[in-house]
Amino acid sequence: AQSVTQLGSHVSVSEGALVLLRCNYSSSVPPYLFWYVQYPNQGLQLLLKYTSAATLVKGINGFEAEFKKSETSFHLTKPSAHMSDAAEYFCAVSHLMNTGFQKLVFGTGTRLLVSP
Amino acid sequence: DGGITQSPKYLFRKEGQNVTLSCEQNLNHDAMYWYRQDPGQGLRLIYYSQIVNDFQKGDIAEGYSVSREKKESFPLTVTSAQKNPTAFYLCASSIRDGKRDTEAFFGQGTRLTVV
């Protein structure tokens, strides 16, 4: 079964520091992988996605992620954190169901805290 | 603008009441989903629908019901059988590439509180 694991329920960085949010996946088929961001009391917004094209994926707000098959990882990075990046981040993988269709399976989320 | 609209944003339910959460999309997506979000537990799938007049139970369907009579609409009813309904509920729809969902779009959520 396809799944994702997000390491660290909370990550704290200083403004201007590197942001690194970790996501490892398991999948028996070539995966589609996603990162979403959620601000308080709002829905989820897509940051970026990997769908078997370039392994380094650039997203919105200066975020990027690299698909590493050998490490089964899809970590999210941003060179310099901004106060507005404080939010919860979810990694997701497409999951093959017994109906032959695929649905998204989400990790438990990582809350990013940014201090001045 | 295309998107997903959830209503209401806040909903209060008395013990023993059924309540229905609305979800409408104008993105022409076939697949729609309902998730429940609780602190520290991420998103858990309640129900999903791949096509009109068809829906499947997710991981936590007990105490919930849905219908999919129109492509645009996927309402969720929280019944009195759901013992702990206080949560944030998210509706989503997705683009499909063949048999695979490639991206999900989310509504702004409904926060349900039992009073």
Image (tube, rainbow, N blue to C red):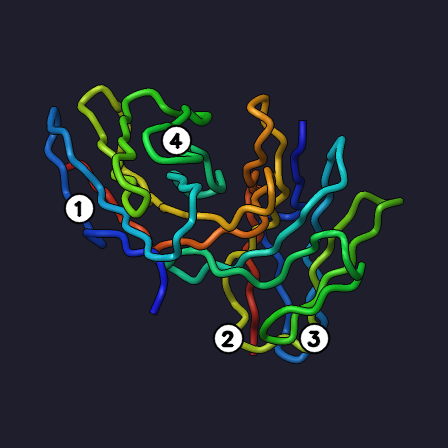
Would you say B95 lies left or right of B37 here? right
Q: Of the residues under marks 1 and 4, which one precedes in the sequence?
A: 1
B50 w.r.t. A83: above or below: above
3 and 4 marks in contact (CB < 8 Å)? no
Is there one chain holding both mark 3 and mark 1? no
Query: Which element type, helix, strand or loop, lies under badge 1?
Result: strand
Q: Tell me where residue B40 appears, x and y as whole percent.
A: 48, 42
* Crowding at mark 1 (Cα within 10 Å: few <14, some 14-19, many 20+): some
Q: Residues within 10 Å of mark 3 (few under 14, many from 20)?
A: some
Chain under numbered label 3: A
Subunit ID for the residue under disc 1 = B
According to the image, label 4 marks what residue?
B47
Q: Relative to B36, is A38 above or below?
A: below
Residue at position x 43%, y 43% in the image: B30
Query: Residue drawn 39% across and 60% down?
Result: A40
Instruction: Report the residue marked by disc 3.
Output: A17
Q: Read off the residue under disc 1.
A: B11
- Residue at image position (18%, 23%) is B80
Q: CA distance from mark 3 to mark 1?
A: 40 Å
